Amino acid sequence: MTDILHTDTDTDTGPRAAGVSFHRPGPPGRLGRTGLVLTVVLAVVAALVAAGVVLGLASPSTADLTGRWAMTVTIHSQDPPQVVALTCDFGADHHLRCLNVPGTAPLEGNGVWNSADGGRFGFWITHHAQLDAQGRPTGSIYAEHLGRLEGGRFTTHGLTFVDMHDGSPWMGPVAVEAVADRVR
C-alpha cells in the first residue's frame, strides 16, 4: 500500500498524474505549534466578535462580568472529571486573569472576555497545563467558554485543548463546564 501523503511517485498513474500535489511535511517545530496556536486564538477571537454581532451586541458590558469571581471548573478529561477552584478577575478592559485557589491544581491563566444582550458572554483563556519542579510551565491549556450571567452567578460550557509542548499530539477537544459566584 502506498502512503499518498509521503509519496515521490511521478508516474502516469500516481497522485501527481491526477493533478494532486503532495509534499513532505517538515519536522514539527515551535513555529508550527505557534502558528497553530495563533490560528486557534484568532479563530476563537473572531468567533467571539461574530457572536457579539449575531447576538446583537449593544455594548461590551451588557452582561457585566467586571469584578472578581469564585469559579469552579469541571474538566471531563478523565473519569471522574477533574474539578478545579479558581479566583478570576474580569477587567473592565475585557481582560481576564485567573489565580489558583491554594491547595488546588496549578491552572493560573490569562484571557479575554466579551458579552452580549440577555446575559450571554464568552471568554478565551490560556492556562499552564503542568509545572515542572522549578515551577516553569511544561504545557498549555487553551479553553473557550460560552455562558450566561444571572444575577451574581454565571454558568458556562465549552471546550479545551491541551498542548504539552513535548511534540506529542494535542489532547482535545475536552468538554468543560464552570459555575462562578461574584465575590466583588
Image: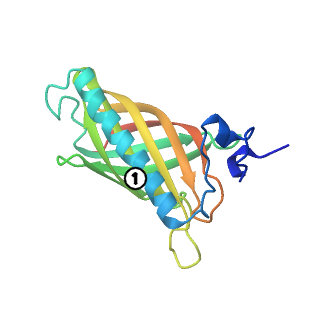
* Position of the C terminus by quadrant: top left
Q: Is residue 184 visible?
A: no
The picture places residue 39, in percent across and down from the top left corner, at 41, 48
Q: Is residue 11 left or right of residue 69?
A: right
Q: Is residue 26 left or right of residue 178?
A: right
The picture places residue 4, in percent across and down from the top left corner, at 72, 44
Q: Nearer the viewer, residue 172 or 179?
A: 172
Q: Residue at x 65, y 35 (%)?
A: 18
Residue that lies at the very extreme toward the front in this rendered image: 12
Residue that lies at the very extreme toward the right in this rendered image: 1
Q: Is 93 placed above or below 50 here? A: below
Q: Residue at x 31, y 37 (%)?
A: 46
Q: Is residue 126 visible?
A: yes
Residue that mark 1 sits on: 38
The picture places residue 104, in percent across and down from the top left corner, at 53, 57
The picture places residue 159, in percent across and down from the top left corner, at 51, 38
Q: Residue at x 39, y 32 (%)?
A: 146
* Position of the N terminus by quadrant: top right
Q: Residue at x 69, y 43 (%)?
A: 78
How many other residues sit within 10 Å of disc 1, few (<14), some (14-19) or many (≥20)?
A: few
Please name the amino acid that badge 1 sits on.
Leu
Q: Is 49 placed above or below 101 here? A: above
Q: Is 91 placed above or below 122 here? A: below
